[in-house]
Image: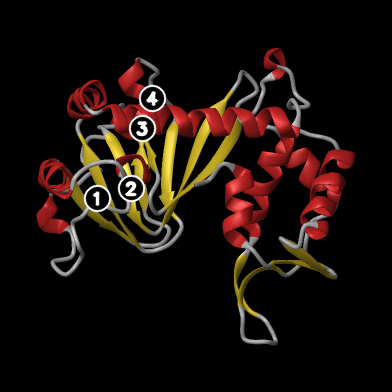
């Protein structure tokens, strides 16, 4: 990600340069976390700022940890050129697949809100995985939970040979709902997310390459579980954290 990651001097002087909130580092001692933080490049990002664009830079530039805020990953998926989206919130990371030889091509990352991001060199992260069992185990558990969630929600309606989009149909819908939602305070003064006018099921289905029936079922399940509430013509998301978990955005 040439030119996209700036050095620590560009980050806010008041921002805490700590990796203690990163979930895969939960098993590391404070001293080790401090040493790792010192080796990272730190960058403050503003809402809607482009954090990564490999189409321009030609490389991802390292493993990136979202210390605060939320970023959205967009990748071109399949021969049809569809775009797969994933949100990564505070405590998460992205770019680590390049450490395993999977190139992060056609990747664009945009900040969904103001935040702080730390970038670690790929070789340093690879060394950390080989040395710290707690980190490699946490990463494997993260992938296992994602796979289990995909199995539980069923296969995607689009086959791999037809330009499959990342994630199951339900996951892609949850990600789309998060993209459409805006911060909202309800009549009781509680924080929520609001989609003022929910698109028709057919339109949502076309966007995420699934069926109208799958969209209807997934939204009905959100309402049944209390994660969301219909407020015609819109949708209120009562439990953002739960929805992000279902979307695999943690």
How crowded is the residue under tag 4: few (<14 C-alpha within 10 Å), some, or many (20+)? few
How crowded is the residue under tag 3: few (<14 C-alpha within 10 Å), some, or many (20+)? some
Task: Tell me the quarter of the picture where residue 93 sits.
Answer: top left
Rounded to the nearest whole Å, what is the CA distance between mark 4 and mark 3?
Answer: 6 Å
Which residue in the structure is indicated by mark 4?
97
Q: Would residue 194 appear left or right of 201 to someone viewing this image?
A: left
State the SS at label 4.
helix
Residue found at x 33% / y 34% = 56
Residue 53 visible from this viewpoint: yes
State the SS at label 3.
loop
Out of 105 and 153, give the one closest to the viewer. 153
In contact (CB < 8 Å): disc 1 and disc 2: yes
Which residue in the structure is indicated by mark 2?
22
Residue found at x 58% / y 51% = 244
Task: Tell me the quarter of the picture where residue 70 sits.
Answer: bottom left
Q: Quadrant of the N terminus?
A: top left
Rounded to the nearest whole Å, what is the CA distance between mark 3 and mark 2?
Answer: 14 Å
Rounded to the nearest whole Å, what is the CA distance between mark 4 and mark 2?
Answer: 17 Å
Indicate how the structure is coloured in the image: secondary structure
For marks 1 and 4 on the same chain, the one whose residue lies earlier in the sequence:
1
Out of 215 and 141, give the one closest to the viewer. 141
Disc assigned to residue 129: none
> Is 239 above or below relative to 75?
below
> Is 226 above or below relative to 108?
below
For marks 3 and 2 on the same chain, the one whose residue lies earlier in the sequence:
2
Disc assigned to residue 19: 1
Task: Tell me the quarter of the picture where residue 225 sits.
Answer: bottom right
Q: Nearer the viewer, mark 3 or mark 1?
A: 1
Q: Residue furthest right?
A: 213
For marks 3 and 1 on the same chain, the one whose residue lies earlier in the sequence:
1
Disc assigned to residue 95: 3
């Amino acid at each position: 990600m040439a030119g996209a990651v700036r050095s620590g001097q560009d980050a806010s002087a008041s921002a805490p340069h700590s990796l203690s909130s990163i979930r895969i580092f939960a098993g590391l001692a404070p001293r080790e976390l401090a040493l790792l933080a010192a080796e990272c490049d730190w960058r403050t990002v503003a809402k809607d700022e482009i954090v990564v664009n490999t189409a321009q830079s030609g490389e991802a530039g390292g493993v990136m940890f979202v210390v605060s805020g939320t970023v959205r990953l967009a990748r071109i998926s399949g021969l049809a050129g569809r775009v797969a989206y994933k949100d990564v919130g505070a405590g998460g990371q992205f770019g680590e697949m390049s450490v395993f030889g999977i190139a992060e091509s056609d990747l664009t990352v945009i900040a969904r809100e103001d935040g702080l991001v730390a970038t670690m060199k790929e070789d340093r992260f690879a060394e950390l995985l080989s040395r710290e069992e707690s980190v490699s185990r946490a990463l494997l558990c993260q992938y296992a939970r994602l796979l289990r969630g995909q199995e539980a929600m069923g296969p995607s309606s689009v086959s791999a040979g037809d330009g499959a989009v990342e994630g199951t149909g339900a996951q892609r819908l949850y990600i789309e709902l998060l993209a459409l939602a805006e911060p909202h305070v309800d009549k009781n003064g509680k924080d929520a997310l609001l989609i003022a006018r929910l698109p028709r099921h057919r339109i949502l289905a076309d966007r995420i390459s699934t069926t109208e029936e799958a969209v209807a079922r997934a939204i009905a399940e959100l309402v049944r579980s209390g994660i969301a509430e219909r407020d015609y013509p819109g949708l209120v998301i009562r439990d953002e954290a739960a929805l992000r978990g279902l979307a695999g955005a943690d």
